[in-house]
Image (cartoon, coloured by chain):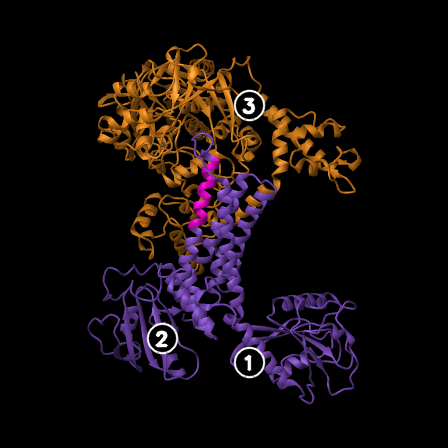
Amino acid sequence: MQTSFANGILAPMKTADVIVALATGAGSAAIGVVRLSGPGAWNIALTLCRDRNEPPPERRLVMEWLSDPSTGRVLDQALVAFFCAGASYTGEEAVELYCHGGPAVLDRVLMACLRTGARSARPGEFTRRAVVAGRMDLLQAEGVALLAMAGTEAAVDVGLGALSGRPSAQIQMARESLLDLLADVEAALDHSEEDGVVVDLEAVAERLGDQANRLAGWLQDARMLRPAVSGVRIALVGVPNAGKSSLFNALLGRSRAIVHADPGTTRDVVGEQLPLAGICCQLLDTAGLRDAGADEVEAEGMSRAADAAREADIVVLVVDGALPQCPDVLPAKVDVVVVTKADLPQSEASWLDAMPETQILRTSCISGEGLNELRSMLAEKASEVARRGDALKAVVAGQRQIDSLTSALRSIETAGHEWAVDDAPLEAVASGIRRAVEFLGEVDGSRVTEEVLDRVFQRFCVGK
Amino acid sequence: MKPMVVVGGGHAGVEAAMAAARLGVPVVLLTHDAGSLGRMSCNPSIGGIGKGHLVREIDALGGEMGRAADASTLHARILNTQKGPAVRATRVQCDRYLYNQGIVRTVMATPGITVIGEEVHDLVVREGAVRAVRTAGGRIIETDAVVLTCGTFLNGLLHFGSETVPGGRIHEAPSTGLSAALMALGVRLGRLKTGTPPRLLASSIDFDATTPQQSDPAATPFSLWPHPGPSLPHRACHITWTGDQCHAVIRANLHRAPLFSGQIRGRGPRYCPSLEDKVVRFAHHDHHQVFLEPEGLDSPEIYPNGLSTSLPLDVQEAFVHAIPALEHAVITQPGYAVEYDFVDPSQVDHSLRCHRVSGLYLGGQVLGTTGYEEAAALGLLAGANAAFAALGAPPLILSRADGYMGVMVDDLVTRGVTEPYRMFTSRAEFRLSLREDNALDRLSPLATRIGLLDASRAGDVEARSCRLDAADRKLTATRIRSSDLPSGTPTPPDGLTLREWLRRPGTDLTTLIPFDASGTLANLHSDERTALAIRVRYEGYIARERVEAERFRAFDGLKLPPDLDIASLSGLSIEVRERLARARPATLGAASRMEGITPAAVSILMLHLRSQGRHGHMAGWGAVEGTCTGEGSSLGSSTGIPGGTSADESTAG
């Protein structure tokens, strides 16, 4: 093994290996950044630095000629930054190589790193190492993931907020408050009778309610913000053969979904990105809603369609203008009704009059009639949805955080409700508060389960 | 077979010797004074919240404490009756002389136990295993298994004001050789402190000025096994309060308190503070409760619970006389503090066997606990496990889901102690399942299987379990028409089952008996009715507790590989690394329960395990067999309880 220039702060080689990945996007660019992390990263980089004979400076860019140590072939001329353990993104010894951005250049630099002893990083591994090293908690790590993929202003604000540590501190505060409450309940259980400790349980119940309201508020904010952060969901729903898939393809401008005259062709929910006036939207084509004649697969498709409609931010009800059937079950909320096949003879649909609040548009995918109006109508609604919520105040964002926080809230509410209504034993109330504390710990990662880690790190692209 | 040696004859030593004898292993029990077996060093009381649970578990495993307490009970109470069933607990006042006599009689009458009144001075260890003990008189007793249950006797030092006297408790000499012997073997010792109040002459107390508290006739005995002999007549206890005058006396004399002068170095129990400690730490409380407990049926003495102190005798007299009803009280024995060596319990495994010395087991207060009940429970486990080792049988290891005994051992072994360990219900994450009423159902089938219960008790356990199962089935199978229900009971049109009816608030099992023609319910003993009703009424909560606790139990399936290089783990503080390196927890679950291991540190450890697991570097995802399964979160034992204690009991145990 070569001598490391770095000193005793380095961890021994055997515990972690050196990982390498391209930190910038695929395709040609002016520069591309290759990142190395792990004990021994300096050695690998230094082996590539053809002309360097002395220790490099820390955290300063130095110009280097990179060459393959086995063949002596020059790989690129690059700017190189060396980071000491404890002072890098991952918390480990690390190196960043700012190379020329051609894919072939980056390829050979990466290959040389791999040949010299590094291995390819797995998705999210750099950030995971940062979490392991205690450089950031899970909320911050997810903030990084958000920033790496941010497609909206709100996503950037939420990601930066998470990085600042403010949401982590707020979750921590909520945990502390619940632990205080738990301490009071436990004192009542263990010490009120024998040790004369007096606990005002009514006040405890009231404070429990305050905590529930606080968490519920955060969840409400997160739900409002979701479209802005992860895109506005637009669902096309309606009876079979109403023309949903045709409309889907027409809006996308390409033939993405299969269109066929047989009713019930679409079985699953098909989703595609659709930018509308600069707002990131997701357009969802769904299986037709009908009662009879559906087989098991189609039934599952319909249940997914119902879910998609429920979770959508904008619901578009698609109606066949030539045969305007009303679905047996109307979605709870319909934002736009599109009457399709305007190119065919139209029939009367009196049931549509029952939806006076809803805007109705006639379109034809053959003639293109009404499609531009529909686009601008959807864009207007999407921008309205995406304006909701205050990204600068978000505490949680993203489904994983929302799920853990929801579980925490549910535990508190169950405890409080049963206590008030069913006279639940005080021990059960205590368990409810304990569970809430643990779920809150899942939110920021101070209490980690495997499940949570999987969910966090599966969302990263390589090199982050 | 060489006899097993038990060193010490307190609550732990007695249970250790009796458990071994029941398993058929001969025992030599060595104690300073053979007449002191099972002596109550401090208050004449057994049970309490968490402690009553332990007594029931000891009883379920065939132990003596419950029966001995029942036979000497003068006063009984059920605590926490207004709270849930899991924290409901029994506490009794005993005649301390009858308790002691009962234990002496039982031990002496047990075949296989030889009691020798000598102090053990040294351990003979060869090749890392115990070979013999040497007494102060020079006698050598060969053995392969030693159970140390020395209580507060290791280098015990009594403090009466500024005066110090070597002793394990008043009028009894300390054990002086064993500490050095243990240290020579590389066992780490620490120093703890506990205390006891002065005893008062009953005839000098003005009971008219106190609030009497009568014994509760509804309280059931600890032991559910058939009882020999009638119970004793019950006596009242009495309550009085300290006040400004008393506190003023203490404040004026704090400079003479060994606790504050630096004379006492050992750490005392936070939950049983001395009166001077309470006056200083809880200065905002202007009075503290004093519970006057009779020492015995015919005893002239009273134990004033709440007045534990090590102030000099003249100050004790002055502050006692400043308490209403005690103005003329005569002190028959001064209060004092005792400092003693203990063995940090992180040096024993879950079978209570010392890591360093094969064949050496520890139990009781020597492991850093406080209280008779904690001591007896540990003594029973240590004695049984030493006996199982002698028999070549696997050890008895209870999990945190099995009982408070499992919780206590796991807490002690994984967390160590910095202050005397007292049992609380908040330490148990499966609290709703670990109740006094079901201790027998939880533990006795196991005790039967491993030979801790004799044939007649095993039969009792079997019969009880049959009665309960039959009744449980009956509750589900029997449907009552709405017309048969008492008027005004809201019912669904097709009536309801007895089970559904029992779940409704205000229904007890006795109400249902007339509706069960088979007589199955009527057949239940009264304690079985209580147990069944609680089981049914709270099964929803209990199921939920189980599911949620299991979520976090996964940590116990994550093995920390023995070759894990803890020193090199980045992200862990030096303190955490040192603690882990010293204790070497076997699983992530055990690590998460260790003192000083933060949740963040646990997360980091887990991430390390995962990243290594993915390389195939370790096979560490398999479940751990045997020890410490069934645990839930680490939260239970780390929850901070604010120190609002105002009228603690002082239990020197």
Question: The residue under label 1 is which amino acid type?
Answer: Leu
Image coordinates of residue B525 in percent, x first then y, are: 64, 24
Image coordinates of residue B105 in percent, x first then y, are: 45, 13
User: Given contact means CB atoms under 8 Å apart, are the residues at marks 2 and 3 in contact?
Assistant: no
Depth check, mark 2 against mark 1: the one in front is: 1
The numbered dot on residue B219 is 3
The numbered dot on residue A34 is 2
Residue segment shown in magenta: A176-189
Depth check, mark 2 against mark 3: the one in front is: 3
Question: The residue under label 2 is which amino acid type?
Answer: Val
For residue B132, above or below residue A84: above
Q: Secondary structure at mark 1?
A: strand
What residue appears at the point 45 percent right and 23 percent down from the top-left corner? B46
Residue assigned mark 1? A276
Find the distance from the CA under tag 1 to the CA under tag 3. Answer: 74 Å
Question: The residue under label 3 is which amino acid type?
Answer: Ala
Q: Colour of chain A?
A: purple
Find the distance from the CA under tag 2 to the CA under tag 1. Answer: 35 Å
The first of marks 2 and 1 along the sequence is 2
Q: Chain of mark 3?
A: B
Label 2 crowding class (10 Å Cα cut-off): few <14, some 14-19, many 20+? Answer: many
Q: Chain of mark 2?
A: A
Q: Secondary structure at mark 2?
A: strand
Q: Quadrant of residue B3?
A: top left
Q: Colour of chain B?
A: orange
Of B154 and A170, nearer the camera is: A170
Image coordinates of residue B24 in percent, x first then y, are: 48, 22
